[in-house]
Image (cartoon, helix red, strand yellow):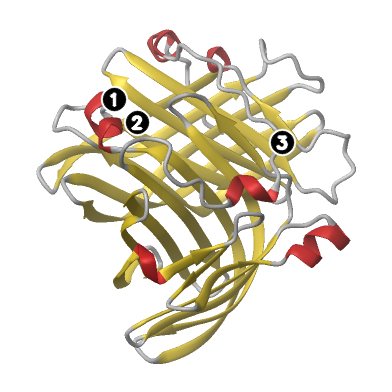
Amino acid sequence: MFKTKAKSENIDRAYRFLKAVDITPEDDTFHGNIKFLDIEWWYFDAIFDNGYSIHIGVRTYHLRNIGFIQSRIDIYKKGKTEVEAVKTDLISKSKVNSNYPTIKINNKPVIEFDYNHYKNKEKWKYHLYLKIGNNEVDLIFISTTKGWKIETADTCWAVPLPKAKVNGTITLKGKKIKVAGLGYHYHNWSYSPFTAIKNLGWFWGRITADTLNITFAKTMQDIEKSDIILVLNQDSNDNYNSENFYNFRPEDINFIPKNFIYNNHRRIPTEFDLTAINKKSGYSPSIDINVNMRTLNVHHTRLFIINYWRYHVVTNGEINLGSKIEKLDNKTQIIEFISFKSKDVQ
């Protein structure tokens, strides 16, 4: 079992404690114009038992009621890109529910929240249906963990599904395939072009073990100033104790990108160490996280002038919650890196 020594420089750069709190379905709805020009998006991904994995995204770019809505399907086989399909519509062709997260495009539901399931079973359930050309997803996401959000003047991030059971079908270049596995969903809002001007970029990732699940992020304002976030979830039907998610203070987290290479004219890492011990986070029982992530494959794309890399990584290590120990043995996960500027990050 490897051990990674904490680097104090990473702790010094993390300067705010961004605390996750409970959410309601309204937090996953369309928030509309908060800034002059708003960018808002819904992100779903899943890793399936048969080696396929997927990303489904819906993104809005708008000034009040003027703008467009972009939907996207990315399908991977063992981390390698098989499909990259994008469709753009006028935002006037979309319709959203203001009480719970349902989005229709051209009168067809793309993201559909099952409010009756939520009321009766207190579990979040989504139906995703999206067809772009001869590629299609028809998937059900059902939560296994408690969701949360982090909302500040410059960070609006809801994670309704830190971990979800996913099943249904994907259609890959006309070929329909039944799939089942585990997924994730988040929603961001109140972002604008000024976000790119004021920041270098961010890393994000989720790490799923048997019943424990980590969501982490590092957002970089500049080389010397960062926010680092880590939230640990456990499955809702796990009666280990009454807590369903745990916030970590930045002083307790170390995230170390390393082994950099050049990819699409930018310097990007290919390996990551994530360690955390809840010394100052104030929880009992003790929590100890020690995970190494090595790149399996990486998918580069652009969002206008912004460089985006979606990684499939192989994880090894342990997540310890009290006496519970869950090992990660070559388990595939999905993480991402966004670079707003050409400056190197670390």
Q: Position of residue 205 (x, y in %)?
A: 47, 42
Give neighbour class at mark 2: few <14, some 14-19, many 20+ (Cα, 10 Å): some
In the image, 119: left or right of 127?
right
Residue found 53% across the figure and 53% down from its top? 331
CB-based contact (under 8 Å), mark 2 and mark 1: yes
In the image, 280: left or right of 89?
right
Three-letter code, disc 2: Pro
Give neighbour class at mark 1: few <14, some 14-19, many 20+ (Cα, 10 Å): some
Nearer to the camera, 336 or 101: 101
2 or 3: tag closer to the N-terminus: 3
Three-letter code, disc 1: Gln
For label 3, the residue is 22
Residue 209 seen: no
For label 2, the residue is 257
Height in image: 224 above or below 58?
Answer: above
For label 1, the residue is 346
Three-letter code, disc 3: Asp
Q: In which quadrant of the rendered image does the C terminus lie? A: top left
Q: From the image, state whether disc 1 or disc 3 is nearer to you.
A: 3
* SS category of the residue bearing label 3: loop
* SS category of the residue bearing label 2: strand
Q: In which quadrant of the rendered image does the N terminus lie? A: top right
How far apart, in angstroms, are the residues tagged by discs 2 and 3? 30 Å
Q: Position of residue 183 (x, y in %)?
A: 58, 59
Height in image: 65 above or below 13?
Answer: below
2 or 1: tag closer to the N-terminus: 2
How far apart, in angstroms, are the residues tagged by discs 2 and 1? 6 Å
Residue found 71% across the figure and 45% down from its top? 24
